[in-house]
C-alpha cells in the first residue's frame, strides 16, 4: 500500500520478507515437503543518517500447504531500537519499533488478509510548515526541530482480486497517539500562532487521542517479479480517512503512485521510475501530513524536513545486477544502482508565498549504491545520497521502490 509519508501515519515495515515473497526457486521448492512448517530467528541491523543504527531481532514462522500460495499462513515479529549521537555528542535512542504480524494469503477465494499490532516511539523532525521551511541553526538544541511521537496501533489490511492483475484494497485501523512537543521548538511556535494564523490552523493532533482510520483503493500490478522487477508496472490509488473518537478533528488523504520498470539491457540493466502525489484535506494531524525526506521518499534530504498539504514526487533509478554467484548452496546477486529523487510540498491548494516561497522550489537528491540479493525474495541496499539540504547514508532491506 502507498504510505502518505515515510514512517508517518502508515509506517513502512523493515521486513526481510516482502508481502508476496516466495522462499527459494522452483527447483529448490519442489524438493521440499509441501506440508512443511518453517521458522527462523535472526538479528536485524540497518542504518540511516536519519535514525542512526538499528539493532534488533526478527522471527518468522510459516506454514506451507500445496493448495496455498505462497504459504497457508505466516507469523512475523520484530523488535528494534535505533541509536545515534545527539547534537551534543550524547547517546540517544530516537526510534523504538516493535510489531507482530499475521498473514493469511488466501483466506477465501484469493482474498488476502494481514493483521498487525505494533508500537512506535520516535523522535520526528519538524522544522516548519511549507516548502520554505528554514534550517535549524547549528548552535541551538536539536529539540528545536523535533517532537516525540508515540503510538500503539492495530491494523487490518485486505486485498481482493478483481482480475489477475487488479486488486481492491482496504485497511482499517486504530491507534492511540500521544506526542511530546518540546519547549522552544518550531512545532510549539507554529501551534501557538507565532508564525501566523494560517500555519497555526493546519497543526492538529498534538493532544493525546484515540484515532480510527479506514482506507480503500485499487492496485494494478503487472510486474514480472516483486523483488527484482525488470518489466511491468505497479499503480496504486488509495483514499484514507481518519478521525479522533471524540470528533475533535477529522481528515482525509488521497494518494496515487505509479511505478514503471523497463529492461534497457536484458538481465543486466533496468530503469525504475516512480511518480506519486499525496493530497491531504480536513484537519490532518501533524504526524500524518505529507513530508519530503528520508530513504523511502527523497534520499539526501533528512526525513521530515518539509511538511505540507500536498506532496509530489518523481524518482528514477538505474539498477544493474551483473554478478551472480553461489555460496554455501545459497544464490546471491551483486550489483550497483544510481538514482535521482525529486519532489515538492505545497502548504495549501492556493498559493501561499510565505510558507512556500514564490519560486519553483523543487527539492532533489542524487547518488548511488550497492545492491546485494539473496535468493528470490531478499535484497540488501546500501546507498549514499547528496542534496543541497544534506548528505545521507542508508543501509536497509528491500528496493527503494
Image (tube, helix red, strand yellow):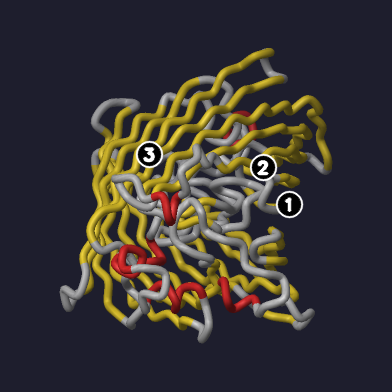
Residue at 46 percent across and 73 percent down: it is 187
Q: Earlier in the sequence, mark 2 or mark 3?
A: 3
Q: Earlier in the sequence, mark 2 or mark 1?
A: 2
Q: Secondary structure at mark 1?
A: strand
Which residue lies under the disc numbered 3? Answer: 67
Q: Earlier in the sequence, mark 1 or mark 3?
A: 3
Residue at 64 percent across and 43 percent down: it is 378
Say which of 6 and 82 sits in front: 6
View extreme (top): residue: 265
Mark 1–mark 3 contact, CB under 8 Å?
A: no
- Disc number at residue 189? none
Q: Is residue 21 above or below residue 54?
A: above
Spatial CA distance of label 2 from label 1 is: 23 Å
Say which of 44 and 217 sits in front: 217
Which residue lies under the disc numbered 2? Answer: 379
Mark 2–mark 3 contact, CB under 8 Å?
A: no
- Disc number at residue 391? 1
Spatial CA distance of label 2 from label 3 is: 28 Å
Q: Quick one: label 1, few (<14), some, or many (20+) residues within 10 Å?
A: some
Residue 174, picture quadrant: bottom left
Residue at 48 percent across and 51 percent down: it is 131
Residue at 26 percent across and 47 percent down: it is 239
Amino acid at each position: 500500500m502507498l504510505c502518505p509519508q515515510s514512517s508517518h501515519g502508515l509506517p513502512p515495515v523493515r521486513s526481510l520478507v516482502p508481502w508476496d515473497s516466495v522462499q527459494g526457486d522452483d527447483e529448490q521448492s519442489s524438493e521440499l515437503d509441501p506440508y512443511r512448517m518453517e521458522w527462523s530467528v535472526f538479528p536485524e541491523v540497518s542504518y540511516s543518517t536519519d535514525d542512526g543504527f538499528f539493532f534488533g531481532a526478527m522471527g518468522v514462522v510459516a506454514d506451507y500447504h500445496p493448495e496455498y500460495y505462497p504459504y497457508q499462513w505466516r507469523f512475523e515479529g520484530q523488535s528494534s531500537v535505533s541509536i545515534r549521537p545527539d547534537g551534543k555528542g550524547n547517546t540517544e535512542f530516537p526510534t523504538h519499533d516493535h510489531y507482530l504480524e499475521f498473514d493469511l494469503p488466501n483466506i477465501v477465494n484469493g482474498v488476502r488478509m494481514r493483521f498487525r499490532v505494533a508500537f512506535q516511539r520516535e523522535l520526528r523532525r519538524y522544522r516548519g510548515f511549507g516548502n520554505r521551511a528554514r534550517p535549524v541553526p547549528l548552535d541551538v538544541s536539536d529539540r528545536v526541530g523535533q517532537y516525540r511521537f508515540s503510538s500503539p496501533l492495530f491494523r487490518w489490511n485486505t486485498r481482493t482480486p478483481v482480475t489477475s492483475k487488479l486488486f481492491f484494497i482496504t485497511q482499517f485501523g486504530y491507534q492511540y497517539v500521544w506526542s511530546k512537543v518540546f519547549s522552544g521548538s518550531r512545532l510549539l511556535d507554529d501551534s501557538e500562532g507565532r508564525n501566523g494564523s494560517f500555519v497555526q490552523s493546519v497543526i492538529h493532533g498534538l493532544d493525546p487521542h484515540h484515532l480510527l482510520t479506514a482506507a480503500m483503493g485499487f492496485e494494478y500490478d503487472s510486474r514480472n517479479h516483486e523483488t527484482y522487477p525488470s518489466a511491468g508496472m505497479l499503480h496504486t490509488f488509495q483514499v484514507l480517512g481518519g478521525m479522533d473518537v471524540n470528533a475533535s478533528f477529522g481528515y482525509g488523504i488521497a494518494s496515487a503512485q505509479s511505478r514503471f520498470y523497463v529492461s534497457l539491457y536484458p538481465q543486466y540493466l533496468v530503469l525504475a521510475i516512480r511518480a506519486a502525489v499525496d493530497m491531504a484535506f480536513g484537519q490532518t494531524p501533524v504526524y500524518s501530513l505529507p513530508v519530503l525526506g528520508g530513504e523511502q521518499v527523497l534520499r539526501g534530504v533528512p526525513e521530515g524536513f518539509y511538511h505540507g498539504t500536498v506532496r509530489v514526487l518523481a524518482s528514477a533509478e538505474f539498477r544493474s545486477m551483473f554478478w551472480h554467484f553461489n555460496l554455501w548452496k545459497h544464490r546471491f546477486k551483486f550489483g550497483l544502482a544510481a538514482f535521482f529523487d525529486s519532489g515538492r510540498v505545497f502548504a495549501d491548494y492556493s498559493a501561499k508565498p510565505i510558507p512556500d516561497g514564490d519560486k519553483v522550489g523543487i527539492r532533489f537528491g542524487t547518488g548511488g549504491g550497492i545492491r546485494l540479493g539473496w535468493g528470490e525474495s531478499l535484497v540488501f541496499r546500501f546507498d549514499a545520497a547528496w542534496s543541497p539540504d544534506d548528505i545521507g547514508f542508508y543501509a536497509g532491506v528491500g528496493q527503494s521502490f
